[in-house]
Amino acid sequence: MTQHLKLRIHVTEPWDFERNTGSAELTGWTIDHADPDNEEWEVHLDHGFDHHERHIGTLLIGPRYVGEHLSRMFDAVTGFPVRLAHRQDGGWHYAFTAMISQRPDKADGHAEQDNGTSI
């Protein structure tokens, strides 16, 4: 079975995302990184959010700039710019921009826990 890639997602647009949802930080996981031909990754959020009276628990992440590939995230120091889509009317609707980074496990082997102080 493919290992889950845990992600941290910092939503940068729309500017009022944090005000509307309570946080600009999202966490989730994907297995789509395992296939290098995947140009977009479907990310299952650890905790979803409400947007325009709809609960969103899954996002589609694509590179923000033409010609880039999501695998460049592994080389980024602070994050990699992406577009985020949510399901709407049977398809994906790009509505947000963000920075993504890998969310590592703690060194002692326990899963990372958010104590509210992470960025």
Image: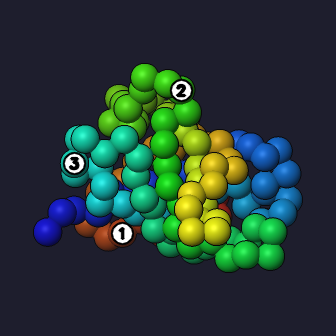
Neighbour class for label 2 at 10 Å: few (<14), some, many (≥20)? Answer: few
Q: Work out whether residue 8 can be spotted.
A: no
26 in relation to 75, above or below: below
Q: Is residue 69 left or right of residue 24?
A: left
What residue is at 80 percent from the left and 76 percent from the top? Answer: 53
Hey, what amino acid is under mark 1?
Ala
Hey, what amino acid is under mark 2?
Tyr
Q: Is residue 2 left or right of residue 4?
A: left
Residue 13, quarter of the rendered image? top right
Residue that numbered label 1 is attached to: 111
Residue that numbered label 2 is attached to: 65
What residue is at 25 percent from the left and 41 percent from the top? Answer: 37
- Indicate the position of residue 91 as horizontal and vertical percent values: 56, 62
Asked if disc 2 and disc 1 are in contact, CB closer than 8 Å, the reply is no
Residue that numbered label 3 is attached to: 35
Q: Nearer the viewer, residue 2 or 85?
A: 85
Query: Secondary structure beneath disc 3?
Result: loop
